[in-house]
Image (tube, grey):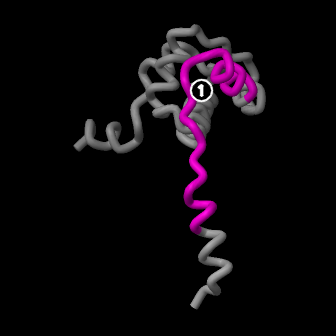
Amino acid sequence: MPSKTAVNRAVRLDQFVLPRWKANEEFQELVTAILRSLPLRVPSGLSSQSLRHLSRLGDGITARVFGILNELAIEAIKDGIERITDESIESWRPALEKEAAFA
């Protein structure tokens, strides 16, 4: 059984919530940093419209944005284009939605 101190710490940590990203300059800086860290051979430049769409797709949640960009990078490498494009963001669908399309 966890100690009272451990329970108190867990309760305090559970109450800390990160704010969701909005499609603003800070979000653009985050996405730019993520794109630079991806192992793509060609730089990915995204329009403000694609950044807004990415923010909506990820629901403003950091982990989701990272996951989407990671999936897009994998597809870009497989397709041989080696960059994430506005078109790839606009056409991206969650894996569950893709699976349902083939059912």
Q: Is residue 16 magenta?
A: yes
Q: Residue at x 63, y 30 (%)?
A: 77
Please state if 80 lies on the left or on the right of 88 as rendered: right
Label 1: state its secondary structure: helix
Q: Farthest residue toward the left?
A: 103
In this view, the residue in front, 85 or 20, is 20
Q: Amino acid at mark 1?
A: Ala
In this view, the residue in front, 69 or 7, is 7
Q: Farthest residue toward the bottom?
A: 1
Q: Residue at x 66, y 25 (%)?
A: 31
Q: Residue at x 45, y 29 (%)?
A: 57
The picture quadrant where one finds residue 36 is top right
Q: Position of residue 48 (x, y in %)?
A: 56, 9
Total numbered labels placed on residues in the image: 1
The picture quadrant where one finds residue 41 is top right
- Residue bearing mark 1: 76
Instruction: Specify whether residue 82 is in view.
Output: no
Q: Position of residue 35 (x, y in %)?
A: 70, 26
Q: Which residues are magenta?
A: 11-33
Q: Is residue 69 above or below residue 18?
A: above
Please state if 90 lies on the left or on the right of 99 as rendered: right
Q: Position of residue 14 (x, y in %)?
A: 56, 60
The picture quadrant where one finds residue 32 is top right
